Image (cartoon, rainbow, N blue to C red):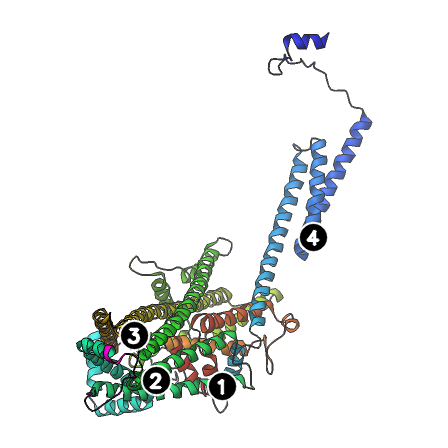
Amino acid sequence: MPGLLRKLFGKPSKKTAAPVKQEYRPPVPRTDKERSADQNYRKRIMDQVTQLTRNAESAGGALDREKLDDARGQFENMQRMARGMNLQGDAEYQALEQEFLSKADGAQDAIDHKARKDAKVREQKENILKQKGTPLETLIKKVKTLNGGANADADYLTGHADPATSTESTDYEADKKDRLSIAKEKLGKAFSLTAFKEFLKERLKDWHGTISAIAETAATSSGIAGDKKDYGEAAETAEKFIKRGNNKTRLNKEDSVDANGIVGNILSLISGVLHVISLVKAGANWIKAANATEGSQLDAQQRWKNIKGIFHKLVDVFGDINGTLSVFTALVPLLGSCLSLTQGGLAIILNLTDMVDSSVHIEMMRRDRNQIFDRIQKKKAKYENAATKDETAAEAYTLQEERYRSRSGDVNEKRKALLQKVALGNQNGASQIHIVKSDEMRSRNDSRYREAQYGIGERMAVLRNEIAEDRAKEERGERVQPNKMKENKSKLRQMEALELMEEYRELDKSHKKMRKALYHQLEEIGKGTVGLISSGTKLTGEIACMTGAGAVAGAALLGTASTVGIVNGGYSLARGGAAQVYGIARKLTGTADNKETTRNDMAIMMIDRMSEVGNSDIWTQTRGFKNEPELDTVNPKTIVRQGRNVSQLHNVLRRGLDADMPELINAPSKAELRKKIAASFGQE
């Protein structure tokens, strides 16, 4: 019957079905025995939650994540049991539950904090171990040999004056000179007899580069003159090709000799000899570095740098040979153009390789620099937090951003301000910082407080020791000077901020160096491409002339190639002249001195950083960096600090500057090492 009804009327809808009325059933009265059992069950739940609270607190103290997770799992079971007994409204149970959650959250924070610290230590330990057996380790060993001993240079701090013998001015504002005053002063010195002697000395010392530049410039000039002659005699050249056919061209008495071509050949020969000497020297230095016994001087990056340098020199020698033998290559049809085309192609390939390398270095420096900036922002947020509030430290990490300045400019302005604060805040005791006099300043952008950055690692170590001693006294119940620990902490954090700003500057200057190198390489690729077009057009014109039928077209192509060559050579000469004028202007206005001051200070900071690493507990006297089992015994704070120092040295010297490590390692003194590191921030 129900089946028949469903067939006739369909299945009844649930939405329209009438709700079933629930009858009220009064609660069943509970006996005394049941109520007593419930009370015992409630008490057991409460006792269990209390015990779990103790377990969570214990897990936080022991930093035992597994024990804390176990306590949380058992607590969830207790919560289900409590819901079964309707204990959510029980005030006593609610208080116990909140206490457990509070203790568990505190334990979780402590365990997470420990995990972050452990991860930080592991990261810096890996950074240290990566540098074992590398040229950087060898360089740090070398710096340690320069610390005290026959090769030590106590005066490697440029412009350093002994505080005991110098008279300090109470006027702490630097007497800045404007560009016009500097130019007048430099011009006055430039025309003195002493300046002329120094000029000669510098020129003689740099004879190789000077002769090379003169030879290459003069050879280019003579080549342009030859191109003009080629254009003027394009028709005659075509006629000679048609008449002689495949016969070799020969010189006779009727042929005129181009004086410019002869001068160009001689200068190309001189340039070639100098390039060969440079090539032999590069090969000898590579062999010397490979056979060094005091430590590794070569790694994959250095070998690749050496290979590129040697290939560049080979291309230069190839071009010099082509220029020197141009008189003879002219006897063989198409040979000169083919050689020029080959040289130009090889040069472009090498410049493209350099461009790719520079792009990689630029990206790495951008990333490293941004990481430093992020650390600055995190430090600022940390010291602005109510739990760890330190107004002095927060202000040290606060940048005054201006719309007309870049981020690098904001950081540099803050760095200068911190130099002054750190210097003025350390004018008492053994750690007194010397403030230089106005006449000791090296350039317009120099600071009278510059010595606040020298040896900053040692000053921070002294402050850390004082803070640790005062903390130990407080724990023993001994009397400590009021606010001394707080003041030392603020001083320490100011120095840490200054050091971080300095690290940002080093990475920023490395980034700018590689960016300029990229621009130069793009320019060389552009010039090389124009040169290839010129050589290719000339080769096409010569081939057309040899066919006979295309003499007119060949002459036009030769003329076009000559014009392109003249324009390309003219651009090179004009740019070289403009660069000379720009360089003189920079020297006269003191801008070149500004750059030298900045580079010297960065080099000094890097040498100090190497000394700090070499004198720390991560270093052994004979083997360099410690092995992993030995590092496990070192204070984690030491590993983190020195790991960051090692990472910064690697990032700047290798990833950023791509410095010639064997050259740095073989520096005979600290003064020479400082000069070489400073020079690494410039273009080669």
Upstream in sequence: badge 3 or badge 4: 4
Q: Are marks 4 and 2 in contact (CB under 8 Å)?
A: no
* Amino acid on which the number 1 mark rests in the picture: Leu
Q: Nearer the viewer, mark 4 or mark 2?
A: 2
Eyeballing the image, is 589 above or below 284?
A: above
Image quadrant in which the C terminus is located: bottom left
Q: Nearer the viewer, mark 3 or mark 4?
A: 4
Q: Nearer the viewer, mark 3 or mark 2?
A: 2
> Is residue 243 a member of the stretch shown in magenta?
yes
The residue singled out by tag 1 in the image is: 146
For marks 3 and 4, give the CA distance: 62 Å
Secondary structure mainly formed by the magenta segment:
loop
Q: Which residue is mark 3?
A: 171
Q: CA distance from mark 3 to mark 1?
A: 36 Å
Q: Quadrant of residue 318?
A: bottom left
Q: Which mark is residue 66?
A: 4
Q: Earlier in the sequence, mark 3 or mark 2?
A: 3
**Which of the two labelled residues, at mark 4 and mark 2, occupies the earlier sequence position?**
4
The answer to which of marks 3 and 1 sits earlier in the sequence is 1
Coordinates of residue 55 in the picture (x, y in percent): 71, 50
Q: Is residue 618 left or right of residue 41?
A: left
Mark 2 crowd level (few <14, some 14–19, many ≥20, 10 Å Cα): some
Residue drawn at (20%, 76%) of the image:
234
Element at label 3? loop
Looking at the rendered image, the disc whose residue lies closer to the viewer, 3 or 1, is: 1
